[in-house]
Amino acid sequence: MKAAIVGPGAMGTLFGVLLADAGHEVHMLDKEPVRAAALAAKDFLLDGVSGKRSVRIPVTADAAAIGVCELVFVWVKAYDTRAAAAALGPLVGPDSIVVTLQNGLGNAQTLSEALGAQHVLAGSTAQGANVVEPGHVIHAGTGDTFLGEIAGPATPRVRRICDMLTAAGFPAAPSDDVAGLIWGKLIVNVGINPFTGLLQVRNGELLERPETRQLMAMAVEEAVAVAKAAGVKLPFPDPLAKVREVAEKTGKNKSSMHQDVANRRRTEIDFICGAIVREGEKLGIPTPVNRTLTLLIRSIC
Ligand code: KPL
């Protein structure tokens, strides 16, 4: 299958390398022309839980040079989704499918507005990856990926892409409720990302102190209240237990916000805790903990 990865960061590189290694024709689109040229000149390297791999993947900053793809994975940060959607038009033909498994609220909507909702599939993944340097990524943890139509039950195209991902090393299953999936992942991110960013600890270390566990519970409780008021059905019965389970399973991982804060890069806080604050305001649910976390992270990055 001809596929494009938009955004060769940690997750984009992980997906690109495993799909290319599985025999797919993979192209990478990077918004930075200089970095694109540097990445194109060497092999991509992947280490970690899925083993060692080294593959050459063409990289460009010009979507027209790639042309129409059957499948496009958007792996830019949530704050760049709008710009990426505007740039990736030449990748999308009448039958192209654009997949977002990104963190944060609003990505599927932004892509649908720019490209047409009929092209967009969304979901979530518990895969974890850390960048060593551009083009070299550690596959830090594996976990399930779920994918679905943005409205309505899973279709044959969803099942086809799940099969393709599973064969490439990302166990994936179809979902009939993408809103629940996205909110479920959002709540996991609310419980893990700001704390790993602020404390600069790995995901598993969050569970070591009762004080940190209490903070996680406070942030998650607010997010769950907002999800309930929004009429979202979460994909797990005990959200806090789920957050702790993910922190444990991805214990050795440096979360994306940990990495962003460590590198003094912009974080996705506005699309994680900030999204809870915005949705809470619309629904009349107070969210002082998520507001404080948003302001704290924005105070440092
Ligand atoms: O999605 C993640 C992230 O790092 O952004 C988690 C699930 C917290 C894994 O690290």
Image: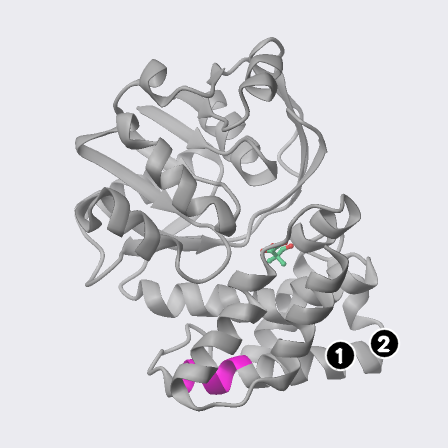
Lateral position of residue 226 relative to residue 40, left or right = left
Q: Which residues are magenta?
A: 223-228
> Which percent across, then down, holds residue 253?
72, 51
Q: In this picture, is 99 found above or below 184?
A: above
Contact (Cβ within 8 Å) of mark 1 with mark 2: yes
Q: Quadrant of the N terminus?
A: top left
Is the residue 257 above or below the residue 21 in the image?
below
Residue at image mark 2: 209
SS assignment at label 2:
loop
- Residue sitting farthest toward the right: 209
* Quadrant of image for the C terminus: bottom right
Within 10 angstroms of label 2, few (less than 14), some, or many (20 or more) residues? few
Give the image quarter of residue 164. Answer: top left
Tell me if 113 is positioned left or right of 5 in this view: left
Q: Main secondary structure of the magenta part?
A: helix
Amino acid at circle 1? Arg
